[in-house]
Amino acid sequence: MSIRIISEKCVGCKLCVKACPFGAIEMVDKLAVIDLDSCTLCGVCVDSCKFEAIQMERGEAEIAPAASEHKGIWIFAEQRRGVVQGVAYELLGEGRRLADAAGEELWAVLFGPGMDEAAESLIQRGADGVLYVDDERLADFNDEPYAEALARLIRKRRPFIVLAGATALGRSFVPKVAAKIETGLTADCTGFEIDPAYGLLQTRPAYGGSIMATIITPNHRPQMATVRHKVMKPLPADASRKGKVVKVGIDGDLKSHTRLLDFIEEVEATVNIAEADIIVSGGRGLGDPKNFALIEDLAMALGGAVGASRAAVDAGWIPYSHQVGQTGKTVCPKLYVAVGISGAVQHQVGMRSSDYIVAINKDPDAPIFKIATWGIVGDLFKIVPALVCELKGVAAGG
């Protein structure tokens, strides 16, 4: 990949100089010049140039010869206590799209005993086949045995792409897998595309969410990534879909330095925002922590959960468990209501895949309005109580 300035188009406006996060561009004789030693090819300058004076070109990928032997797209189907987790179905939805674009088969990898019915459900949600390891040793999650088992499968069957959820479980063992098989891993991805030369283009937020970086793994296979929960859309179940369930064994020991003693069930005192269909979130625009009562009233009237921006959490107005965004929870409700939230990139990463977004803000230029389905410009202290009153009236009238 290379980048160059088209001098005939450069007008010396310095927009690219201001945009470059690495200070790799300077003005020489009123023309932009890129320091290729400092440039990381992030592409921010290309997007910032209004005159199309910066061009980024992809050359032929130098892929290791063995890479051509890798076939198929895999998703790791996370399960807990014998129940397939929602992130697995999200991965299948995205994996199906990628597999169709790449002309590859889509396989789900499932660990744990007695899960034949769950394996069939993965086919109904988009998998062409399931590699099912019906092994009592993998009934409960333990990062070392899981990493060793998946690494052995990858070495033996040589997939092209492997995707897993960026959950607590995925973040714990998938990096170990990548290290074992000596390939790259892109964490917390929010988007993918298939490129004929480079394979999987992996997009994720970088530099505090100020840019969206596209990452490639040109020289190693499989290409591996973890995916944020609630960013991808699952496919509806199709009982007519047919596929192969292949039971595979893991030979040898699966040693671990830790052992499971007991389960402690997580207790949710409030609605878990990661699973809620309706979320009402508040930001610093509320002006005071006591004003989160307005958010709670609206959430209650809608039958939803309460969320918050990082700014509100950092100010100590509401606990971290309510935070939506890059450093909080990624959510994908049917309805997301943002009240007094400007909509920084870091916040958008965590909620922009919501089905419908309603933004309430007094600033008509707030970034949140660019992604909102409906926007209300005005005083939230008048708008929110009016909405609550209207909703209660509707509820009272049946």
Image (cartoon, rainbow, N blue to C red):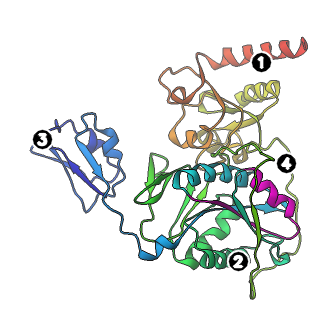
Direction from residue 56 to residue 225 in the image, left or right: right
Q: What is the CA distance from the residue labelled 4 to the residue labelled 3?
A: 60 Å
Q: Which mark is residue 268?
A: 4
The residue type indicated by label 3 comes to: Lys
CB atoms of marks 1 and 4 within 8 Å = no
For the residues labelled 1 and 3, say whether their Cβ atoms are less than 8 Å apart: no
In the picture as drawn, the residue positioned furthest to the bottom comes out as 252
Q: Which of marks 3 and 1 precedes in the sequence?
A: 3
Q: CA distance from mark 2 to mark 4?
A: 32 Å
Q: Which one is in front, 288 or 186?
A: 186
- Left-right relation of 362 to 306: left
Q: Amino acid at mark 1?
A: Val
Neighbours of disc 3 within 10 Å: few (<14), some (14-19), many (20+): few
Query: Does residue 116 show up magenta in the picture?
Result: yes
Percent from the top left, x then y, of residue 134?
82, 73
- Residue at horizontal 20%, vertical 49%? 26
CA separation in Å, label 2 and label 3: 58 Å
The disc, 1 or 2, on the residue closer to the chain's N-terminal end is 2
Quadrant of the rendered image containing residue 219: bottom left
